[in-house]
Amino acid sequence: MLLAALFGRTHRRQGNRTMRTRKRALGLTLILFFAAAAQAQKASGPFTGSHSESFETQDSQGFHTCVPDRIFGGFGELCTPGHTGALITTGWTYLCTVDEHSGERFFGSAYGHAELTFVSPVWRFGGYFATNSGIPGATVRFFDSNDLLLGSAVVSVPADCGWHWNGWQADSGVGFSRIEIIGNEQTGAYIQLDDIEVDADGPQPGAVLCACDAASGWPNGVCGNPGAVGHGCGSGSNPAGCSYTATGSTLGDSIILNALGAAPAQFGLHFQGTSVSGAGAGVPFGDGLRCAGGDVVRIQASVTDSAGASATGVRVGMAGGVGPGDGARFYQFWYRAPAGSPCGSGFNMSNAYELVW
């Protein structure tokens, strides 16, 4: 029934005076620059973002330039530029021993600083930091989509091999496209990360719900394939599952629905419902959960890119026949996922996303 409904619809004295004037101007420029840089981000307490990474599905063998699989379900990449220092490990002894913050694995750099890049800018970044170098502290630097430095901050990470939360929120109206984490050890290395979080593209206009995780009542997924926190159920190409979020505003019908971490190069469908199935928890459907139910409307068909991402390019409100004052609607992404299909159905679902019009 659901599929039928869906498939149916970025001089010397003067010279000295001039020089002093230029120096004062330069000094003022630098003051303004550093003031702006200082305001580019502010500290953020622990949060659960639109994308989470605990490194549990990553390969723990050997050193690499970049973590072998992209992180955040394909939304980001984590590297040690110019070095093969990236390591996924279950424990690391140097001057002291770091064990995982949660689960069994975490990330660290054995040589060179760590660098995160994202498919699109993020407005919050945070996670748990540790160091086994015996040298406390690190610096984090934030860059925009044009690779211009937005600002920097000190990472509070004592040399105790323990885990310490550090997080920041964009505070200048410009998101972070690249983030460098530079340890105080001479190569910038020996900073470990675990349970890192990002929020994409600014404050969310709605809310994630009906995820394939323990908090939503699905600790084992549909067939032993739970996704990451806030995501859909795991697929053969991405055990973390597909994440579904949105940017924009319902007031101007500028909403963009974003699916990340679906199967790459596969047909998918964004759709809208008037209710949430299964008393808000969803019901098994293929390898995932059918969440958006009731009166179902097709928003847009697409083919995912090589990272398994798909974003709407239509006016969502117009496509769904809704506008301001029409109340809550629920959105989801259906996608083909034939390779290694956990339940054998060949298709899967994202989490659901609620917008109030």
Image: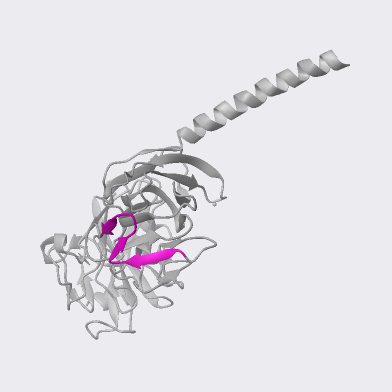
Determine the image quadrant of residue 104.
Answer: bottom left
Residue 357 in percent (x, y) is at 29, 49
Can you see residue 321? no
In this rendering, position of residue 84 left or right of residue 338: right
- Residue reaching furthest top? 13
Q: Quadrant of residue 158?
A: top left
Region rendered in magenta:
85-99
Q: Confirm whether residue 196 shows in the render.
A: yes
Q: Is residue 104 left or right of residue 200?
A: left
Against 171, residue 180 (above or below) is below
Q: Which residue is drawn at 36% across and 68% down?
A: 261
Quadrant where the N terminus is found in the figure? bottom left
Quadrant of residue 265 within the rendered picture: bottom left
Q: Residue furthest front?
A: 95
Residue nearest the observer in this picture, 165 or 341: 165
Q: Is residue 235 magenta?
A: no
Q: Position of residue 100 (x, y in %)?
A: 25, 60
Tell how many labels. 0
Q: In this view, does 224 lie above or below 45?
A: below
User: Which SS type dominates the magenta stretch?
Assistant: strand
For the point 66% across and 23% down, the residue is 25
Q: Where is residue 143 in the image (x, y as percent from the top left)?
A: 51, 47
Up the image or down, 194 lies above or below 20; here it is: below
